[in-house]
Amino acid sequence: MQRNDEIGACAIGVNLMTEKLKQNIGSHQRLMADVSHALRSTMTQLQIALGLAQ
């Protein structure tokens, strides 16, 4: 049931904020995974270079 008063408008706003928050959390998790992967790759390359230099 959908209300057409202030409570209904507030509920719609809360639902929209909830969806946006879920999207932002997902984006944050993807960013952290991408940064983590980039750092691990760089560290591995540095370790290989160091091993070759030694």
Image (tube, rainbow, N blue to C red):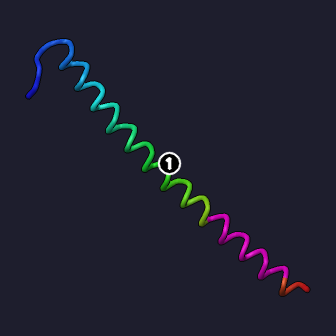
Residue 45 lies in what quarter of the image?
bottom right
**43 w.r.t. 11: above or below:** below
Residue 50 percent coordinates (x, y): 85, 80
Q: In which quadrant of the rendered image does the C terminus lie?
A: bottom right
Residue furthest top as drawn: 6
Residue 29 percent coordinates (x, y): 49, 53
| Number of numbered discs visible in the structure rendering | 1
Magenta region includes residue 21: no
Q: Give the magenta range.
A: 38-50
- Using a 10 Å C-alpha cutoff, classify the residue at mark 1 as few (fewer than 14 neighbours), some (14 to 19) or many (20 or more): few
Q: In which quadrant of the rendered image does the N terminus lie?
A: top left
Residue 24 lies in what quarter of the image?
top left
Q: Which residue is mark 1?
A: 28
Question: In the drawing, does residue 15 fall left or right of residue 38?
Answer: left
Q: Chief secondary structure of the magenta span?
A: helix
Residue at 61 percent across and 62 percent down: it is: 36
Residue at 59 percent across and 66 percent down: it is: 37
Residue 47 lies in what quarter of the image?
bottom right
Magenta region includes residue 46: yes
**32 w.r.t. 18: above or below:** below
Residue at 11 percent across and 17 percent down: it is: 4
